[in-house]
C-alpha cells in the first residue's frame, strides 16, 4: 500500500441554504478543495450521501456531481452508510489511492435536508434504524439515543448537567467557526430548559437539520511533496459495523462498532489513544459524544459525562473534542459530516483553525470518528502531520 | 405502504414467533436465516414469553406523522426471561411513573394506520404490570 496524504480541503458555510441547489452546494465545496490542493485535475471521486432520494428525489448523484464539477466521464461513485456516509467516502478514496488504482481522488460529502418538512426529514433519517422493529413502533432518532441516555444515566449516574456540558462546549467552539450553522454560545441553564424532544434529550441536545457539503483531496505522499503542501498523512483507517437495531445489542451503554473501528485504526497507525492529541467525534446527540468518548478509550467507561463537565474535552482540556463545534453547532448534513470532520482535523494540524479555536502546542495527531444510525456503523480515521 | 409488507411480519407481530437455533439455542427475533452466534442455518419456530423487564425508556414528544395523535408516548426496550430484547410502546400507564427495571406484560394492540392504503397494523406493546 502507498502512503496517502490529504492535500486539499473545501467547505462552505452550512445552514438552511434555501437559495442553493443540491448540486451547487457540492460543487462549491469541491472547487475550494481542488484549488486548495493546487492540483490541475482529479482522477476519480467518491461522494458520501445518505439519501438524496428522500431529501431531494435525486439518486444517481455521483455522475451528476462529476458532470457539474466539470469532470464528466471520470469514475465517480456514491457510497452510503447512513450518517457515516462521509467517513465511508473518505475510507473508500483512501483505499483507492493507497492501492495504486488512482493518484488523485476527491472524497466528498453532501446532503440537502431542508427541501422537505421536519416530518419528512424525520422519516428520511429514520430509514437508518430498523424499519420493521424500531420505526414501526414509533421510535425516532432522538428517541433511540434517548434510550441510550437513560440506560447510561441509570448505570453510571450521568446527569442532565453533564449532557448539557457537551452542548455548551460544542457551541462555544462552533461560535469560533465561520462555517458553523449555529455559531452562538449557550449555557447549561438554556440547554436544561430547552424544549423536550424525547426525554431526557431536549432540542439543545440534538444536532440540527442542515444543508451542506465538504470535500477533501487525497493523493500519495510523493505527489503531495511535489505540490509543496503540508503533508497531512492518513496513518489509520478503521471501519466496523453492528446490529442496526439498538435492542439487539448486548450492552445499550457502549458503541461496539465505534470501539472496534477505533481499535482497528489505532492498530494500523501503530499508536495508542494516548498518542492522539484531539478528535472530532459524532455528537449527533450530546449522549453520543459521551458514549463515543468512552468507546474510543479517550475517557474511562462511565466517566465521559463527568470529564466533559470538568472541561477535559474543551479547547484547553486534556483531550479536546469537536474543536469545530461538532455536529451540534456546526450542523449535521448527514452525508457531509464525516468529510467535514477531516476538514477540521486538517485545519488544526496545519495550524489554520480560525478565530482562536486553534489548539495550542502544535497538535500532531488528530482522530475523526463518524457514526451511522444508532451506532450500526462507525468509521475512525487518524491523521498525522509530517 | 403495501399490505404485503405488513402481512409478511404477521408471525412476529401477531404471535411473537421467533427462531431458535437448533445448534446453539440462540433465539432470533425476528427469525433469521443464519444464526448470528454460531452461523448455523437450522431453526425451530418458538413463541416468545409475554413478559419482560424494562431496560430503558423514553417519552417521545416530537413524533412521526402517523404517531402525532398519540404524542407524548413512551417507548422502551424490555428484556424477556429468555434474553430476547424488544422495542415497543409502553401503554395504559402514566408516563411519569415509568421506571427502569419495572415488569411489563406484552400485549397485542393496534400500532398505526398507514396513510396510502388505510391498512391498520397490529403488533405488540408493553403494559406495566402494576396496572
Image (cartoon, rainbow, N blue to C red):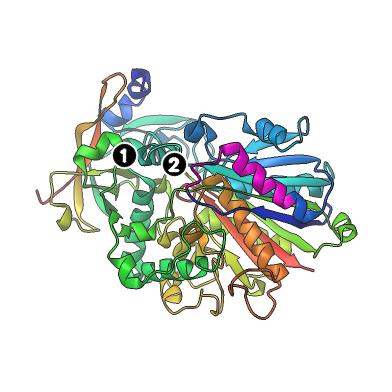
Which residues make up the magenta segment?
A16-33
Residue beneath label 1, please? B64
Magenta-colored stretch includes residue A336: no
Seen from this angle, which residue lies furthest front?
A19
Residue A191 placed where, x, y %? Answer: 33, 66
Q: Which residue is drawn at 30% across and 18% down?
A: B117
| SS majority, magenta | helix
Q: Which of the labelled discs sits on residue A125, or is there none?
A: 2
Q: For this rendering, which residue is in front, A21 or B78?
A: A21
Q: Residue at x 34, y 72 (%)?
A: A188
Is residue A305 left or right of A272 when viewed as pictured? left
Residue A134 placed where, x, y %? Answer: 36, 40
Q: What element carries label 1?
A: loop
Query: From the image, which quarter does the C terminus of chain A lie in?
Result: bottom right
Q: In this view, does A255 lie above or below A111?
A: below
Residue A181 shows up from this direction: yes
Q: Quadrant of residue A221?
A: bottom right
Residue B111 placed where, x, y %? Answer: 24, 33
Seen from this angle, which residue lies furthest left?
B131
Amino acid at each position: 500500500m502507498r502512503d496517502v496524504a490529504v492535500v486539499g480541503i473545501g467547505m462552505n458555510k452550512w445552514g438552511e441554504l434555501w437559495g442553493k441547489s443540491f448540486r451547487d452546494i457540492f460543487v462549491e465545496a469541491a472547487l475550494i478543495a481542488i484549488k486548495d490542493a493546487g492540483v490541475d485535475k482529479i482522477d476519480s471521486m467518491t461522494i458520501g450521501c445518505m439519501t438524496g432520494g428522500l431529501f431531494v428525489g435525486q439518486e444517481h448523484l455521483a455522475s451528476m456531481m462529476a458532470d457539474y464539477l466539470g469532470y464528466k466521464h471520470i469514475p465517480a461513485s456514491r457510497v452510503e452508510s447512513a450518517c457515516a456516509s462521509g467517513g465511508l467516502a473518505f475510507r473508500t478514496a483512501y483505499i483507492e489511492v493507497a492501492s495504486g488504482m488512482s493518484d488523485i481522488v476527491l472524497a466528498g460529502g453532501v446532503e440537502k435536508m431542508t427541501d422537505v418538512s421536519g416530518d419528512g426529514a424525520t422519516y428520511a433519517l429514520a430509514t437508518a434504524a430498523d424499519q420493521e422493529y424500531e420505526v414501526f413502533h414509533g421510535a425516532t432518532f432522538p428517541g433511540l439515543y434517548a434510550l441510550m441516555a437513560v440506560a447510561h444515566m441509570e448505570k453510571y449516574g450521568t446527569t442532565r448537567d453533564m449532557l448539557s456540558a457537551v452542548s455548551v462546549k460544542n457551541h462555544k467552539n462552533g461560535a469560533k467557526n465561520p462555517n458553523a450553522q449555529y455559531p452562538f454560545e449557550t449555557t447549561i441553564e438554556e440547554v436544561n430548559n430547552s424544549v423536550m424532544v424525547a426525554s431526557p434529550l431536549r432540542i439543545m441536545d440534538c444536532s440540527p437539520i442542515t444543508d451542506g457539503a465538504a470535500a477533501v483531496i487525497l493523493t500519495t505522499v510523493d505527489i503531495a511533496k511535489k505540490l509543496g503542501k503540508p503533508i497531512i498523512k492518513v496513518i489509520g483507517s478503521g471501519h466496523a459495523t453492528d446490529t442496526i437495531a439498538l435492542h439487539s445489542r448486548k450492552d445499550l451503554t457502549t458503541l461496539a462498532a465505534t470501539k472496534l473501528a477505533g481499535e482497528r485504526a489505532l492498530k494500523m497507525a501503530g499508536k495508542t489513544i494516548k498518542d492522539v492529541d484531539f478528535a472530532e467525534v459524532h455528537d449527533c446527540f450530546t449522549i453520543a459524544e459521551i458514549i463515543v468518548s468512552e468507546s474510543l478509550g479517550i475517557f474511562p467507561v462511565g466517566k465521559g459525562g463527568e470529564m466533559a463537565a470538568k472541561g477535559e474535552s474543551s479547547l484547553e482540556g486534556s483531550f479536546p473534542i469537536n474543536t469545530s463545534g461538532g455536529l451540534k453547532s456546526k450542523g449535521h448534513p448527514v452525508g457531509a459530516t464525516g468529510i467535514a470532520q477531516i476538514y477540521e482535523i486538517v485545519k488544526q494540524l496545519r495550524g489554520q483553525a480560525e478565530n482562536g479555536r486553534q489548539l495550542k502546542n502544535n497538535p500532531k495527531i488528530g482522530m475523526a470518528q463518524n457514526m451511522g444510525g444508532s451506532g450500526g456503523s462507525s468509521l475512525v480515521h487518524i491523521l498525522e502531520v509530517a | 405502504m403495501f399490505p404485503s409488507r405488513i402481512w409478511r411480519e404477521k408471525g412476529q407481530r401477531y404471535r411473537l414467533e421467533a427462531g431458535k437455533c437448533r445448534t446453539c439455542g440462540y433465539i432470533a427475533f425476528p427469525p433469521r436465516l443464519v444464526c448470528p452466534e454460531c452461523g448455523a442455518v437450522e431453526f425451530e419456530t418458538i413463541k416468545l414469553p409475554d413478559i419482560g423487564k424494562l431496560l430503558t425508556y423514553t417519552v417521545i414528544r416530537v413524533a412521526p406523522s402517523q404517531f402525532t395523535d398519540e404524542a407524548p408516548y413512551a417507548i422502551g426496550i424490555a428484556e424477556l426471561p429468555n434474553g430476547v430484547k424488544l422495542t415497543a410502546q409502553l401503554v395504559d400507564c402514566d408516563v411519569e411513573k415509568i421506571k427502569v427495571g419495572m415488569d411489563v406484560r406484552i400485549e397485542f394492540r393496534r400500532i398505526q394506520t398507514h396513510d396510502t392504503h388505510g391498512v391498520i397494523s397490529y403488533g405488540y406493546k408493553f403494559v406495566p404490570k402494576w396496572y
